Amino acid sequence: MLDKNAKIYVAGHHGLVGSAIWNNLKQRGYTNLVGRSHRELDLLDGAAVKAFFDEEQPDAVVLAAAHVGGIMANLQYRADFIYQNLQIQQNVIGESFRHGVKKLLFLGSTCIYPREAPQPMKEEVLLTSPLEYTNEPYAIAKIAGLKMCESFNLQYGTNYIAVMPTNLYGPNDNFHLENSHVLPAMIRKVHLAKCLNEGDWEAVRKDIGLRPVSVVRDGVKRVVDAASTEADILDVLAHYGITPEAVTLWGTGKPLREFLWSEEMADASVHVLLNVDFKDTYAPGERDIRNCHINVGTGKELTIREVAEKIMAEIGFKGELRWDASKPDGTMRKLTDVTKLHRLGWHHTVEIDEGVHRLYEWYLKGICINHQGH
């Protein structure tokens, strides 16, 4: 158990999970927290990371910083995904080791598992067959990170634990129409379609004023924001399947997904950081110690179509929901087996209906607050 005065460095503390972990630690009375924005500390810069560790000397580290994105981003920027994630991990885990950090928590993702993994996926299915092609570079980086934690523990007796969350959503999510995760992107698309459907241009302009939308056509980038013409806004939003009559989403809507509220992911992460040691993550007496990472999820799944319908109902969009089956679906199922997590003493409580409601409320509040500030 970490002392309440322990200095804890949260890498990526402005992100979806990092910000939730930061708040969770504070609520539990851990106030000696250290964070640096990307502008203040570039985790790709080894010398800068070393200087930061020299200066701060943290007792514990939460590595929640990563280069992340959806199917499209993973396909287009393959080199960025593998290079940047490996580099961040090398620098942060390496300096944690050199500075004698007592406890480190590494955050990965359940996309580390094989495309055809038996469902629900147990930790042991790691590296048993090929990965999903679309996010292979990202998955390989995350596998390298969890193996680095495992290997340092085995060789040097460190206490570095890796957790692999399922699909996350929650406050501070990224609502970018191209690079965000599936659930926040759907919420924003349906919200904008509803505003167009109702002719509420003020609401449309508020939304894209806060988060301008761009599209690249024939090598030329076009950006629309609050000052753009209605015709330009309609044209660019249509590129993302957003029209007054309908929302068109990628794929068939058939893949099954599991969703975990980000603040619950944070609670599970902090539970592991404070209560779980490396020796708790594998069966005693095993000859080959591997797969010591811990799945974090709900153990429940629903189709992308069902999630989209829940979002349509929550937002009250009267138009149609359409599917573009020419676009990839990604993996058909990726349900986590959370037996290990339950054995280590943590269970989820926020179900999907409540989560969708909470996230849409958060999204609307953000638009209103920012608009009042202008």
Image (cartoon, rainbow, N blue to C red):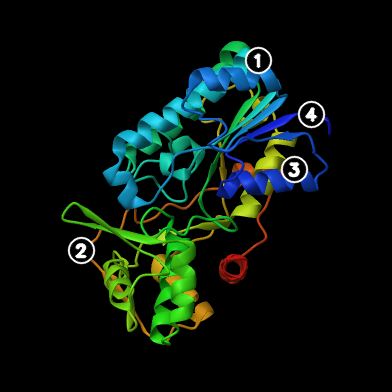
Q: Which mark is residue 25?
A: 3
Label 1 residue SS: loop
Of 348 and 318, which appears nearest the observer? Answer: 318
Q: Which mark is residue 6?
A: 4
How far apart marks 2 and 4 lie (CA) works out to 52 Å
Q: Residue 320 vs residue 110: left or right?
A: left
Which kind of residue does numbered mark 4 sit on?
Answer: Ala
How far apart marks 1 and 4 lie (CA) works out to 15 Å
Against 48, is 324 above or below?
below
Lower sequence index among marks 1 and 4: 4
Which kind of residue does numbered mark 3 sit on?
Answer: Leu
Label 2 residue SS: loop
Label 3 residue SS: helix
Quadrant the C terminus occupies: bottom right
Which kind of residue does numbered mark 2 sit on?
Answer: Ser
Against 213, is 70 above or below?
above
Of 152 and 201, which appears nearest the observer? Answer: 201
Q: Quadrant of residue 345?
A: top right
Q: Which mark is residue 326?
A: 2
The residue wearing badge 1 is: 99
Lower sequence index among marks 3 and 1: 3
